[in-house]
Amino acid sequence: MESNRSLTFGVREMSCASCVGRVEKALGAVPGLQEAHVNLAAETATISFNDTFEAADVTAALDAAGYPAELRTYRFSIENMSCASCVGRVERALAVAPGIASVVVNLVKEEATVRVIGTSLSPADIAQTANAAGYPATLVTDLVTDQVTDQGAADATADRKAEEAAHLQRMTLVAAVLTMPVFILEMGSHMVPVIHDWIMDTLGMEISWTIQFVLTTIVLAWPGRQFYLKGFPALFKGAPDMNSLVALGSSAAWGFSAVALFVPTLLPDGTRAVYFEAAAMIVTLILLGRFLEARAKGRTGQAIRKLVGLRAKTAQVERDGQLIEIPVDDIGVGDLIQVRPGEKIAVDGVVIKGMSYVDESMITGEPTPVEKSADTEVVGGTVNGTGALTFRATKVGGDTMLAQIIRMVEDAQGAKLPIQDLVNRITLWFVPAVIGVALVTFLTWLLVGPDPALSFALVASVAVLIIACPCAMGLATPTSIMVGTGRAAELGVLFRRGDALQSLNKVKTIALDKTGTLTEGRPELTDLTLTKGFEESDVLRLVASVEAMSEHPIAAAIVRRAEQTGLSLAAVEDFNSITGYGVSAVIEGRNILVGADRLMIREGIMLDDVHGVGDSLGQEGKTPLYAAIDGQLAAIIAVSDPIKPSTEEVITALHDLGLKVAMITGDSKNTAKAIAAKLGIDTVIAEVLPGGKVTAIEKLQLGAHTVAFVGDGINDAPALARADVGVAIGTGTDVAIEAADVVLMSGDLKGVINALHVSQLTMRNIRQNLFWAFGYNALLIPVAAGVFYPVFGLMLSPDLAAGAMALSSVFVLSNALRLRWITPALAEPLSSVSPGPDCVPAAAE
């Protein structure tokens, strides 16, 4: 059976949405490739493939299409090679690893140069493959590109993009300096009579046009050459892109003007005119737009760079009884690591000794430092406070929580929403359609336009070519996804699947698991009502001493309260667990009974005077227990699972958003209804067995309702997968998190509101971008074609068209970048509440 795997890698030379379609088409022809998604804003492609796939086929297909894949190059020193057959063995061993594009082994230097596509294959993975083949490999650390860690790779990508932006800035400046005289000579002469007279008196028309020709030719041949080197080959391949439109438009304007200057006899009478300034302005303005676009694109990935930047570079590790500083990548599972005050925690682990407060806000989004002491877990990338800690590494490298978060965010940012499929289908044929419209425009003006018809035809057709760039369409969705999911990660909300952004925006009902989601998931003692003649400390000490012999969660709650009060437990004799009733024991010669009311009745202990108390506690959703000492009722004890401090505020906020709230619980119907009434929950599905949550979700989905389910336990995983959107509390189990579409890292229900908030704002932002991108083309293509000229005498010049085109892409990117400043919908932490009226029974789910 063939296995499916996935890979994400960079793709260069993409400039507009039509490029996306061509890249996907090229990838679709690669043998063994199952699916391909291309992200224009991130300049990446994500593919899934089976065992017949070879990465070299991908690089070859993309090279042929004109969109080379971004490759990483590593150099390894190889041991044990002695002959040419060893070279072949090493090459074959490494070549079969997924993601390896090429392997070149040098026997004399005893080195292997490996080119890798994507990020899923690390240098350590490559070295392990060589080691398994019997040829130990060591990464050469003086690699030119220094892409030996995730940090190095991220820095290299950032440096490359910064260099691209810097190059575009230089080219834009050169083009602007050369274009300005052309613009003044031509447009100044048309618009300002004084300039026209001065030019005619000093230079004359022919010299003025010659100067324009020289300067414009330099602009097109130097700063603008990229459009022709990419645009015309794409056109000749029958796959025109944005560069093709710019190349055609500017070449047409320059070519017509050159003919008018040097061989005017080839033109009909009355049509001699030059449009050098249009050709130069087209290139200059589009270069300016690309520069602004590159700068804005660089900001869309800031969230990932921030996450990668959280990694510690070195750590103090105990080795052979000594404390040494080593790179984080050299830390192994089980290593003991010391963390000094103010240092970053290197990897995930468990504290062995020490006490401190750790700032985990970069992981959870919660500002309050978390106390860490022996046996508590720490997360790599978080910042230690003023205390010192020693912890044992449990997860290193790609297994750490930070590495998993980075992968989740990268996956989400590379996702293609359903709405993007429509955009890609449109843009695939959009450029050829624009060329067709430009041709029809040219012929129409030439045949029925006023004199000089040829000049009108040229201006209108060039304006159509330039203004119809599909860049804004292609950037509209992925830029918003990148910025939105990145900002969500900063708020402690991880979208494991990018399309959950769109799905979450359509949710009508939020279904909440009770235990561990609405509640703390741990019972607490909330009430201790004494009868006459008994003291609270004495009763609590005796009852807790008995319950310490039990493993029941309710017993643990009573013992915990005694320990918090500072009481010492007594020795227990003759302990007996009475199934279905409670427990009994002898302590210090006194007979102790603790259990349900039926235990008291069975033992002949009168409850007439306190039945009302027990009933009242039950109506409040608490579990009442009774304690008797030497045959006399001593106390009524209430235990419940406290509701999380934020629960009530979150449910109110969900209602304010127009959503219905449902609770799924294993509690009895009466208890569940009491909780629902207290919290304002709309729908209750009670007495649900662990395996029945999927059925409960399906029941809520009847009538085409879109349902999001929020849970945290192992038994929540099937329901999380079945819901339209599964939201896992990040403090829950790995199984639940793996089954979810969205993960709330803080474990706070406020994250649900923040997730909805980010989803709504991101989808609104996408709709705004698409409206602008499609509306801009729908409105301005007819204007550029000259449909308003017969009525208003309005024509759109090619240079204005170039400016408008550049503005459309910059607008879309700038609009998406606004998502960087999304504020949490429920930002302020709530004051803690004491156990009591906000508690619910500790029934098992």
Image: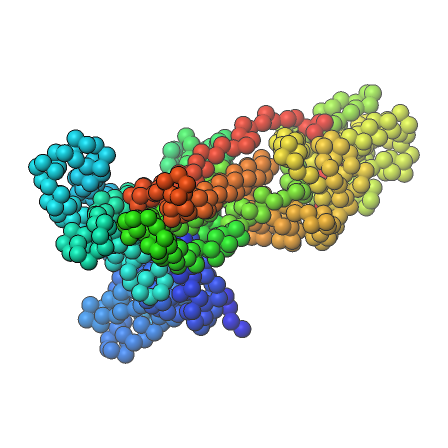
Query: What's the residue at 36%, 67% (across, down)?
Result: 61
Quadrant in the picture for residue 388: top left
Between residues 41 and 573, which one lies in front from this camera angle?
41
How many numbered circles does the render carry? 0
Residue at point 37%, 69% (across, down): 57
Residue 310 relative to residue 248: left or right: right
**Residue shown at 53% from the left, 53% from the top:** 418
Q: Judge by depth and name the residue closer to the eye, 128 or 592.
A: 128
Image position, residue 679 (x, y; %): 71, 32
Is 109 on the left-hand or right-hand side of 6? left
Where residue 94 sits: x, y (%)? 35, 69
- Asked whether residue 421 is in view, the answer is yes
Q: How is the image coloured?
A: rainbow
- Nearest the camera: 275 or 753? 275
Query: Which image quarter: residue 588?
Result: top right
User: Which residue is rendered at x = 52% and y = 46% of the image?
Assistant: 495
The image shows residue 310 at horizontal and vertical percentages of: 39, 41
**Visible residue check, residue 622:** no
Place residue 649 in its image quadrant: top right
Query: x, y (%) of residue 817?
Result: 41, 38
705, above or below 681, in the image: below
Q: Nearer the viewer, residue 620 or 638?
A: 620
Quarter of the figure that contains the N terminus: bottom right
